[in-house]
Image (cartoon, rainbow, N blue to C red):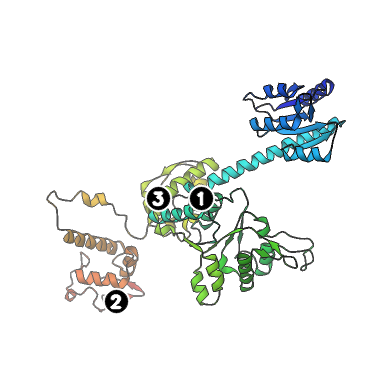
Amino acid sequence: MRIARALVVDDDSTLRMSLFKALEKKNFQVITASRQEEAKSLVQSETPLDLAVIDLNLPDGDGIELMTFIKTLHPQCEVLILTGFGTIESAIRATQKGAFHFVTKPFNLDELLTLVDRSLNQRKLEQENDQLRTELQKKYHFEQIIGQSDSIKAVLDLVCRVADSDATILVSGESGTGKELIARAIHYNSPRARKAFVAINCGAIPSELLESELFGHVKGAFTGAIQNRVGRFELADGGTLFLDEIGDLEPALQVKLLRVLQEKVYEPVGGTKSLQTNVRVITATNKNLEELVKQSQFREDLFYRLNVIPIQVPALRDRKSDIPLLLAHFIDVMNKTKGRKLAGISPQAVEHLQIYPWPGNIRELENLIERISILKGAGRIEVSDLPPKYLIQGPMILKVENISESLPEDGLDFNTAVDQFENALILRALEKTGWNRNQAAILLRLNRTTLVEKIKKKGLRPANDKHDRHDDPDRDDPEHDDLNGTEVFN
């Protein structure tokens, strides 16, 4: 760990030595100077300077000018200005130029050391905030939105183009598709990135409390309002307010939100004074707001105010080519954050997961990998590690390689090959289900009537079926009827 470094500049040798000893006891590496030029030569090394205690009136110059010079070389250095001629004007000048505090001589040494601690603690907090902000920007940078499918690329292209604007954005998509991730990416790549990103779920808070959450309230506004409360609009001032599940907003609050968006002012609950707001609003919904407008459940004027730039986030089932990338990403995350030692996932397991419909979208996929990482801990994820619901009971897994091996050198008739392949698929599905046409249709994701027509047209029947059936596999006879809800061929 690097030792903190401090500079003391004062032409009073007794004071200089006293500060030297006091700071050395606090584990500083201390250097001293009696003049401005001497101090300038000492700080021009690349060794970082953490603290400078400088007399305002030096024999060869002004302490504030020296402070400015030092901060040019060491921006993170905290400075305390000392003077025996304290005035309000000089104190204001010192702090405006970047001094942490202004101390009048004579001073209490313990009080000065307390100021030293405060200044370094504040600097540490600022550095931690900067680091956190940097990590957030990295976390929510566009590259962290995983996917190479055309649909997600189109979303990212739109996000890149709108991030710099202050336009209101409506992010639509099913639950679990990553709508808040899109909103955060917009914020942390916008000019508002250094200000707050404040999120609130409009569907998770009772309507009678939501107004207070959004706009705050004054003491005595209602039973239980024992003190003033700051609302989310005030917390997000200068930054971004993300309103999730905006479709659940009650009509009365829709009116108040519309006013804020139009006039940039609002009143806390129970308040009489209007407050100005400078907030970019991003909303999200998993509902069809246009349909809600038609049903008079959502204000049309508010919808158009929110829908300045619409962003539709695709469901995971519509971007299945991204599933291998998402799997690799979440496995890597679990290994790094949970200390797991997962070694990837087998191609067979990936194929099962690519066919699964993912009603919970990316959130469900992430939860699955977390579950497996906890139970398995290490090694490659195999099909046997997948919960039963993710095992393919639908369409067979087909590989192009299986048919490319039989492709003759002199070519083949494409339509005939496709017809034969379709026949094989239908027969495999029927055989797999014991010739239950309902179940076979589900496996092939066909309508039952479509499958029956194909069976009839192609004249398909079980290999051991010796009956003529008049070439009608769907003929309504006792051997063919559904028995107790199950279709059978005898």
Q: Residues within 10 Å of mark 3 (few under 14, many from 20)?
A: some
Element marked by disc 3: loop
* N-term-proximal mark, 3 vs 1: 3
Of circles 1 and 2, which is in front? Answer: 1
When asked about the image quadrant of residue 486, the answer is bottom left
The C terminus - image quarter: bottom left
Q: Is residue 143 visible?
A: yes
Q: Position of residue 153 (x, y in %)?
A: 41, 53
Residue under label 2, please give it. 481
When asked about the image quadrant of residue 273, the answer is bottom right
Between residue 47 and residue 297, name the one nearer to us.
47
User: Going 64% across and 63% down the picture, which residue do you hit?
Assistant: 264
Residue under label 1, please give it. 371
Looking at the image, which residue sits at the far left? 410
Q: Position of residue 113 (x, y in %)?
A: 80, 32
The N terminus - image quarter: top right
Element marked by disc 1: helix
Between residue 29 and residue 342, name the one nearer to us.
29
When asked about the image quadrant of residue 85, the answer is top right
